[in-house]
Image (tube, rainbow, N blue to C red):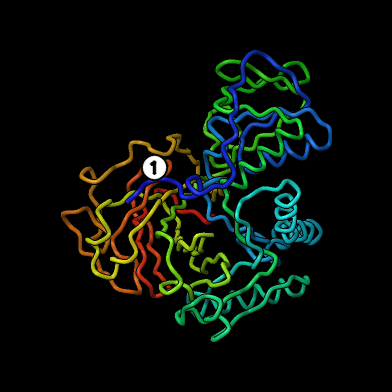
């Protein structure tokens, strides 16, 4: 089992070498954070002729912007009517319109800047995992269609043709959406921003922010940037005590595991049009294929697991040995009374490895080697592996089934904080 990020390994866009910030500089707008939000901000400012300097603590990308599922979705976790209820009619509908047009904007940037990120525009599928999920999808379809969105409720045979399984009876197809390789997309944004004139600095973590007259002064280990305007685009990776953004989020964690490229005779019927998919569970599962035919499954939680060979899980795993597995953090709005503390360890941290597992309070399929009791069948994920990008905890999260009925991997997830990212 290989630990790593598949999107890094398969990105057609090369790494953009970025020098650390050194000495003192001035600019019109400073941006902290080199993920998709920060890079898009820098790109659009530079194209408008605004001087912009971006600081990234690591390489681009090194966090969730490059480690997500790669779905280009239109909307939020909650349906459009709920957004209006939360924000009010005017602001809610404005938000819905912006969110609905987001995939078109992403694909426009990809085309305009020739970003090679293996983009598909065949839509995404929201899968109902039970009768309640079917009712929820019907409610969402009605709300989207009232706003003119090109969505469709697929049922029975129409759903089977798109998904490749009879275990899912209902799915919402959103034709506005699609998929990308998120590492390639993020690197492409960085290249486009630099070409447009933005100054990008890697390995330049902001160590402090202070007022400098009417300006902001951002310090790093080797230099500083002074600017009248500042954008903090750190989201879930907001870690320092001085950064007030951290008060507005709690960390959510998501892990994924991928098969090797699967030939059509094994998996040709699974998501044949390459739509990305996720289900209606609270602890959701994601499913997609990449451009080389890998089946990629994910779920919420931090990932630490038994890294034994897949053959130990039983005969159903024999044809689905795994390639990389990986994880990332996302930012979520905290509930009442929550005071989040974000992990700071980069990928490859000192989380528990095989032979040093903390004890589990359960005895089901995923356990340390001495207690393994895998329930391997074609409709579950056998005992397998995950990695966590930034892990420090040891409580268990829920596991997700494999609805496609083919040999796959099962990832054991550990998380201290439930998330709805």
Q: Residue furthest bottom?
A: 157
What is the x, y in percent for residue 311? 24, 61
Residue under the image location 65 percent in, 72 percent down: 140
Residue under the image location 67 percent in, 30 percent down: 54
Q: Residue furthest top?
A: 23
Name which quarter of the figure residue 70 lies in. bottom right
Is 323 in front, or is 140?
323
Q: Residues within 10 Å of mark 1 (few under 14, many from 20)?
A: many
Does dot 1 land on a helix, a strand or a loop? loop
What is the x, y in percent for residue 80? 70, 65
Which of the image's four quarters has the C terminus? Answer: bottom right
What is the x, y in percent for residue 220? 58, 20
**Placement of 368 over or under 242, stated as above or below:** below
Residue under the image location 72 percent in, 58 percent down: 99
Q: On the image, numbered disc 1 is attached to which residue?
A: 391
What is the x, y in percent for residue 204? 57, 25
Q: Horizontally, is 302 left or right of 219 in the view? A: left
Name which quarter of the figure residue 322 lies in. bottom left
Residue 71 visible in image = yes
Residue 38 visible in image = no
């Amino acid at each position: 089992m290989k630990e790593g990020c598949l999107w890094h390994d398969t990105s057609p866009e090369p790494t953009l070498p970025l020098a650390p910030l050194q000495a003192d500089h001035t600019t019109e707008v400073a941006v902290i954070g080199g993920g998709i939000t920060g890079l898009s901000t820098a790109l659009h400012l530079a194209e408008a002729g605004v001087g912009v300097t971006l600081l990234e603590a690591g390489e681009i990308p090194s966090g969730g912007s490059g480690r997500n599922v790669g779905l280009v979705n239109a909307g939020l976790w909650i349906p459009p009517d709920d957004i209006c209820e939360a924000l009010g009619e005017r602001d809610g509908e404005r938000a819905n319109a912006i969110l609905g047009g987001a995939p078109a904007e992403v694909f426009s940037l990809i085309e305009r800047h020739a970003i090679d990120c293996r983009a598909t525009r065949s839509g995404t599928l929201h899968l109902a995992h039970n009768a309640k999920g079917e009712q929820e999808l019907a409610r969402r379809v009605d709300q989207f269609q009232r706003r003119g969105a090109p969505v469709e409720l697929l049922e029975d045979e129409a759903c089977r043709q798109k998904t490749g399984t009879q275990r899912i009876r209902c799915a919402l197809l959103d034709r506005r959406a699609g998929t990308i390789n998120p590492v390639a997309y993020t690197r492409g944004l960085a290249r486009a921003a630099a070409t447009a004139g933005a100054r990008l600095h890697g390995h330049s973590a902001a160590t402090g922010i202070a007022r400098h007259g009417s300006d902001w002064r951002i310090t790093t280990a080797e230099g500083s940037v002074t600017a009248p305007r500042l954008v903090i685009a750190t989201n879930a990776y907001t870690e320092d005590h001085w950064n007030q953004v951290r008060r507005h989020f709690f960390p959510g964690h998501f892990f994924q595991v991928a098969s090797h490229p699967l030939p059509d005779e094994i998996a040709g019927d699974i998501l044949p049009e390459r739509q990305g998919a996720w289900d209606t569970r609270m602890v959701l599962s994601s499913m997609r294929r990449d451009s080389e035919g890998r089946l990629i499954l994910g779920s919420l939680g931090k990932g630490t697991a038994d890294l034994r060979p897949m053959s130990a899980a039983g005969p159903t795993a024999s044809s689905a040995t795994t390639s990389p597995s990986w994880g990332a953090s996302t930012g979520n709005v905290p509930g009442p009374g929550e005071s989040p503390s974000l992990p700071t360890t980069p990928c490859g941290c000192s989380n528990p490895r095989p032979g040093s597992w903390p004890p589990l309070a359960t005895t089901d399929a995923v356990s340390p080697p001495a207690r393994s009791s895998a329930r391997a069948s074609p409709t579950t994920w056998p005992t397998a592996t995950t990695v966590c990008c930034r892990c420090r905890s040891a409580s268990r999260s829920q596991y997700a089934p494999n609805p496609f009925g083919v040999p796959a991997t099962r990832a054991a997830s550990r998380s201290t904080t439930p998330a709805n990212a």
